[in-house]
Image: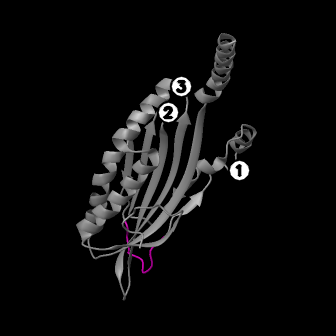
Amino acid sequence: MRIATLAASAAILALTTVAAAPAEAQSRQRSYQAYAVIDFQTDAPKGQVIDAAERILQNYASDFQSNRPIAVQTPEQPGRFQLTNPLAESRLAGLAALGGVSTQQFMVATCDGAVWTANVNRSVSGSQQLRVQLCLFPYKNEEREGYHLNLFASDTAISGGGLTERFGRALANRLVGTPRDFTENMLRQTVQAIEASTDSSAVLIEGEPEIPGLAWRR
């Protein structure tokens, strides 16, 4: 009787394992977007601010692009980035909807009037797809001068998958932290580098959602 019971239990366990295997092997994605507008009151030249930021960002990106447009005149009030969806009016939006894909993940920031723009991309197979855009807007008026750093991040973390994918992801997380840890560290160190280079204190003007652990969130 005991042998029959053990055999039945083993059969149930085997069926459960087989049934669970396909679901366990499926890859899952979780995406979030974040933005922030950060103020640095300083009379430091723009090159000093940009160099400080680029030194950090280059170490975090698998693909890094930087552009320094010429600013003819510094405005009294800083500019602000605008979010646009290039797929909103295209046929691809319809195809994405049919496939259950939200086009919100394709939002991009436009930075008219910025003296520096940067695109940071990090692609880790089976772990993370990160895209960060940064814009630097100068300002100078009778009361103060400085820069507004605008940033927009679109981060997709990947979970699930086969045993090899999960093992590789766990190893990477032990070395550099989770995808979200990686993103927060990059943003925090960028802000801190600008503060140190310009002897200024960063102040968060606005942002969403709250990103814990960032030095400039006061």
**Which mark's residue is nearer the viewer, 3 or 2?**
3
Specify whether residue 4 is in view: yes
Q: Tag 2, which secondary structure? A: loop
- Graded by Cα atoms within 10 Å as few (under 14), some (14 to 19) or many (20 or more), the crowding at tag 1 reads few
The image position of residue 23, as x and y in percent, is: 64, 29
The image position of residue 157, as x and y in percent, is: 52, 43
Which residues make up the magenta segment?
71-79
The first of marks 3 and 1 along the sequence is: 1
Question: In the rendered image, which residue does mark 3 sit on?
Answer: 162
Image quadrant in which you'd find residue 94: top right
The foreground one among 15 and 33 is 15
Q: Main secondary structure of the magenta part?
A: loop
Q: Which mark is residue 205?
A: none
Question: In the rendered image, which residue does mark 2 sit on?
Answer: 126
The image position of residue 25, as x and y in percent, is: 59, 27
- Tell me if 28 is positioned left or right of 61 in this view: right
Question: In the rendered image, which residue does mark 1 sit on?
Answer: 89
Question: Is 163 situated above or below 160?
Answer: above
The image position of residue 165, as x and y in percent, is: 48, 28
Q: Amino acid at mark 1?
A: Glu
Residue at 35% from the left image edge and 84% from the top image edge = 144
Question: Is 18 situated above or below 66?
Answer: above
Specify whether residue 112 is in view: no
Question: Is 171 situated above or below 48?
Answer: above
The foreground one among 206 and 63 is 206
The first of marks 1 and 2 along the sequence is: 1
Q: Tag 3, which secondary structure? A: loop
